[in-house]
Image (spheres, rainbow, N blue to C red):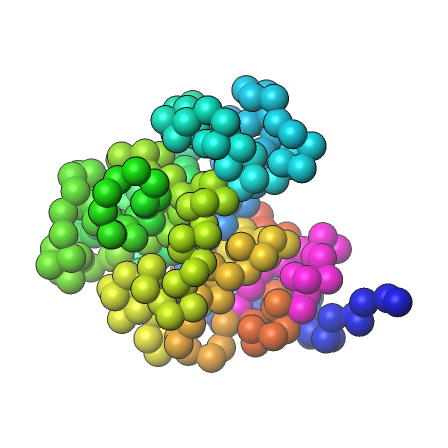
Amino acid sequence: MNAPLPPPIEMLQQVDAEAALVALAAPLRAGTIVPYLGPALASLSKPSVPMTPEALAEFFGTKVALPRRARGNAWASAQHIESMKHRSTLSALMADAFAPPVEPTPFHRYLASLRLPMIVDTWYDGAMREALRSHGEWGEIQGITRAGIGESRWYRYYDAAGSETDRAAAETWTTLLYKPHGCIVPSRNFIISDADYVEVLTEIDIQTPIPDQVKNRRTERSFLFIGCRFHDQLLRTYARQIAKRSAATRYVIVEPDGLTKNEVRFIATQGMTPIAIPLARAVEILLEAA
C-alpha cells in the first residue's frame, strides 16, 4: 500500500519569492527574525570540508572500513568508529575533517554586522564565528557530547575570544551564536554519534538540552531557515525543538525539486512558509534589500 502523500504546501516562487524576501529584510535587520543556518549557506564559499551529513559519512568511509548499515549515514558511521575504536579516534577524525577554515560568505558577514539577538548555526564549521569576530559584544553556546566528561552539562559557553565562560556572561551578550551540534572552534565540541544524539533526544522534548538563553531570545521572534535540509529525522527534531514556542510564523528557503516527501510534510506541519528560490539568489536579494 502506498504511503499517503504529504499535505499540500503553497510555494512562493519566482517574483513572489523575491518579493517575500524583500519584505523579510526589514524584520531580519530589526532582530525580530532569528536566522537558522544550515550548511548549504557556508557551502556557497566552496569550502574544502564536508558540508552535508552525507559528505561527512563519505569522509569517515575514507578513513575507516564501515559496515554496510553505517555507510552514507554520518551519525551511524560516527557511532561505529566510537564503538570499535575510541571516542578519541572519532574526535580526531572530526578535527581532521573540519581543520581547513571555512571562509564566511558575504551573508555571514552581513548577519554579523546586524548585531542580532540570536543566530542559530547548525553545522560544525566556524564561518559564523569568524564573521562575528570584530562585531560588538557577542558570545557562543555550543552543544557538547557527554561521553566520558563526567559532567551533567549539555552545552558550554564561550566568549568572543574563545575562552570558556558562564551563563552570567551570556546574559550580557548583544548577539548569541547558538551551535547546537558543536563546532570545530574554539574547543572541538562535537555532537555526532548515535549515542550522543540518544542522550539529547531523550530529553529534548522537555527542552532540557536547550539553553535558557536560547529559549528567552526566541520568544515572540520568527525564524528564517536558510540553507537547511530536513530529510533526516534528527535534523527535523532539532529544528522543531529549537524553534518551539517562538512566533507562529516561520519561513524556509527551499529548492522544491529536491525536497523529499518527509521534508514537505515537515514544512507543512510546522507552519513554515516555503520560499522557493535558489539559495545563492535568495541571499543576494536579502543583501540587496539591506
Camera-nearest residue between 202 and 288: 202
Camera-nearest residue between 180 and 148: 148
Q: Is residue 258 above or below residue 47?
A: below
Q: Residue at x 63, y 54 (%)?
A: 231
Q: Is residue 284 visible?
A: no
In the figure, is residue 27 to the left or right of 271? left
Q: Where does the image place residue 132, in percent across and percent down from the top left?
A: 28, 45
Q: Residue at x 30, y 38 (%)?
A: 148
In the figure, is residue 207 to the left or right of 223? left
Q: Is residue 243 above or below residue 185?
A: below
Camera-nearest residue between 266 and 206: 206
Q: How many marks?
A: 0
Camera-nearest residue between 119 and 206: 206
Q: Quadrant of the N terminus?
A: bottom right
Q: Residue 190 lies in magenta, yes or no? A: no
Q: Is residue 1 visible?
A: yes
Q: Residue at x 35, y 34 (%)?
A: 184
Q: Where does the image place residue 270, in percent across and percent down from the top left?
A: 56, 73
Q: Is residue 137 above or below residue 80?
A: below
Q: Where does the image place residue 162, in percent across and percent down from the top left?
A: 20, 38
Residue extent of the magenta highlight: 251-265
Q: Where does the image place residue 259, in percent across and percent down from the top left?
A: 70, 57
In the figure, is residue 85 to the left or right of 262? left
Q: Residue at x 58, y 57 (%)?
A: 233
Q: Quadrant of the C terminus?
A: bottom left
